[in-house]
Amino acid sequence: MKEISDKKITTNMAPSFNRILAVLGVSALLIATPVSANGCYSGGESWSDVGTNTEIFDAMDSVCDGFAGTFSSGEAKSVCSSFSSGNRVNWAVTNNQGNSQTLIASDCIAAMTIEINACSHGSLQQHGDFLYQDDPNAGSC
């Protein structure tokens, strides 16, 4: 009788354990992968048309420092950065959650860095509770 009981426990635990592993695996994937709102822009000015990597990342750091703080539900903040090339980048962050959210500068920098490195013409992407836009354009602000 004990043998049957042990088999039942083993049989019942295996699917539960597999389900837990599946949930953890999907959760890890969702945390590590940004959810696409619209994705990378396919045309227009590229990052290299706007400025050097140093100029772009310095501007992004400054923008993210300025964006840091509490956003009410649906609140958006935007800013434009002009570069010596005569071109610009339009930056924006929107809280698209149903309640107030706090944006930390380092989270903004991490999200924008991912987008700048992944999308040569800028992007509109969801990261966590915020929608980020980074858009290189011709002409100054």
Image (cartoon, rainbow, N blue to C red):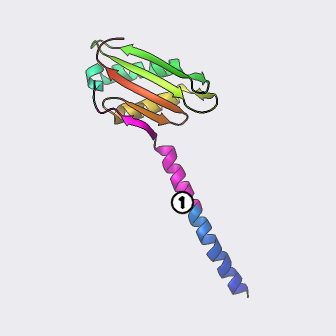
Percent from the top left, x then y, of residue 35? 46, 41
Judge from the rendering whether residue 42 lies leftward or rightward of residue 19; answer left or right: left
Circle 1 packing at 10 Å, graded few (<14), some (14-19), many (20+), is: few
Residue 34 sits inside the magenta stretch:
yes
Judge from the rendering whether residue 29 lies leftward or rightward of residue 11; answer left or right: left
Secondary element type, mark 1: helix
Relative to 86, say whether 13 is above or below.
below
Please name the residue that numbered disc 1 is placed on.
22
Is residue 54 visible to us here? no
Residue shown at 46% from the left, 32% from the top: 111
Relative to 40, say whether 2 is above or below.
below
Relative to 82, say whether 97 is above or below.
below
Which region is colored magenta? Answer: 20-42
Q: Residue furthest bottom?
A: 1
Percent from the top left, x then y, of residue 27? 54, 50
Residue 33 sits inside the magenta stretch:
yes
Residue shown at 49% from the left, 36% from the top: 127
Percent from the top left, x then y, of residue 86? 28, 12
Quadrant the C terminus occupies: top left
Judge from the rendering whether residue 112 lies leftward or rightward of residue 140; answer left or right: right
Relative to 118, say whether 73 is above or below.
above
Amino acid, disc 1: Ala
Judge from the rendering whether residue 43 lies leftward or rightward of residue 103; answer left or right: left
Residue shown at 48% from the left, 49% from the top: 29
Percent from the top left, x then y, of residue 92? 46, 23
Is residue 130 visible to us here? yes
